[in-house]
Image (tube, rainbow, N blue to C red):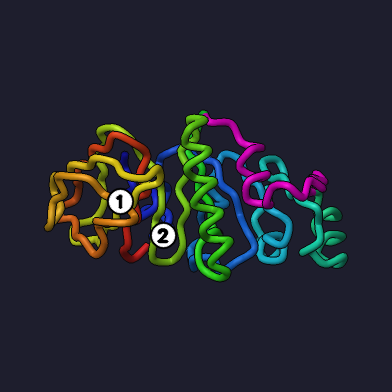
């Protein structure tokens, strides 16, 4: 699992990896517009349009703006429609805009989600649950802010990232056996919310390996 495509995006470079993206209504990393340039398909969720409207890129052919539109101003809606962007109404109140946006994308490509972390903690927790549930449907989701990458994995995964990045591992289904190689403090045992959770660990080199019996959440913190 190569996370270097996110480093490339943050450096204003071509990641040379195909991906889809979701844009939500919260703080975005400074390089967010570079992701628009290289994304295969873009889903802008409701209030995310208030930030999306500032791009001067011509992205009409690959962008959908969706939601129940309770967080987007009439002026922004009219402006983007006049610019030729497609709007899809999703009035369902049983799912969040983030979940509805992810559901619109296929599992053929990894999905980069911006604006999912920080702010209201209940939203962040729910977004983590989206990662876990969509992982079970074979969707690879990476939730990214200015400092963190959050994703879900299971089984044996070799993760390529920058050296000395901080790494956290947390269980999503109760206790689970985890073995790591390449971290400053390697784990070989069970992690559990009521027991051991690996936080503030460090990648010794530019990659590390995680093996887990069940789905776990992985957070890599660096400068993106």
- Which x, y percent locates residue 49? 71, 60
Total marks in image: 2
Callout 1: SS: loop
Q: Which of the pair 119/164 is nearer the observer?
A: 119
* Closer to us: 80 or 90: 90
With respect to residue 24, does 105 lie above or below?
above
Figure quadrant of residue 57: bottom right
Q: Which mark is residue 10?
A: 2
SS state under label 2: helix
- Quarter of the picture holding the N terminus: top left
Q: Could you classify mark 1 by the number of other residues whose Cα lies within 10 Å: few (under 14), some (14-19), or many (20 or more)?
A: some
Report if residue 70 lies within the magenta region.
no
Q: Is residue 91 left or right of residue 141?
A: right
Query: Would you place residue 108 above or below residue 81 in this image?
Result: above
CB under 8 Å between callouts 2 and 1? no
Q: Residue, x 26% and y 49% (percent of image)?
A: 191
| Disc on res. 192 | 1
Distance of label 2 from label 1 (alpha carbons)? 33 Å
Residue at the (58%, 61%) spot, across then down: 123
Between circles 2 and 1, the one closer to the viewer is 1
Judge from the rendering whether residue 94 lies leftward or rightward of residue 164; answer left or right.
Answer: right
Name the foreground residue: 216 vs 173: 173
Describe residue 205's horizontal placement relative to residue 21 as left or right. left
Q: Position of residue 196 (x, y in %)?
A: 24, 56
Pinpoint residue 109: horizontal percent, then vertical percent: 50, 34
Q: Which residues are magenta?
A: 85-107
């Amino acid at each position: 699992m190569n996370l270097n495509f996110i480093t490339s995006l943050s450096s204003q470079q071509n990641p040379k990896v195909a991906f889809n993206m979701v844009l939500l209504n919260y703080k975005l990393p400074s390089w967010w517009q570079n992701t628009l340039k290289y994304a295969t398909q873009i889903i802008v969720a409701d209030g995310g349009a208030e930030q999306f409207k500032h791009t001067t890129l011509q992205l009409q052919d690959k962008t959908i703006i969706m939601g129940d539109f309770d967080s987007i101003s009439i002026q922004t809606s009219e402006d983007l429609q006049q610019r030729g962007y497609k709007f899809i109404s999703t009035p369902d109140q049983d799912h969040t805009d983030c979940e509805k946006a992810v559901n619109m994308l296929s599992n053929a490509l990894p999905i980069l989600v911006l604006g999912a972390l920080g702010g209201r903690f209940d939203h962040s927790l729910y977004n983590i649950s989206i990662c876990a549930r969509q992982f079970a449907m074979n969707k690879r989701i990476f939730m990214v802010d200015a400092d963190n990458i959050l994703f879900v994995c299971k089984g044996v995964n070799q993760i390529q990232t920058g050296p000395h990045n901080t790494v956290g591992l947390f269980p999503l289904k109760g206790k689970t056996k985890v073995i790591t190689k390449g971290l400053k403090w390697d784990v070989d045992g069970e992690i559990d919310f009521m027991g051991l959770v690996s936080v503030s660990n460090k990648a010794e080199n530019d990659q590390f390996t995680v093996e887990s019996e069940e789905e776990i959440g992985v957070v890599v913190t660096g400068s993106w």
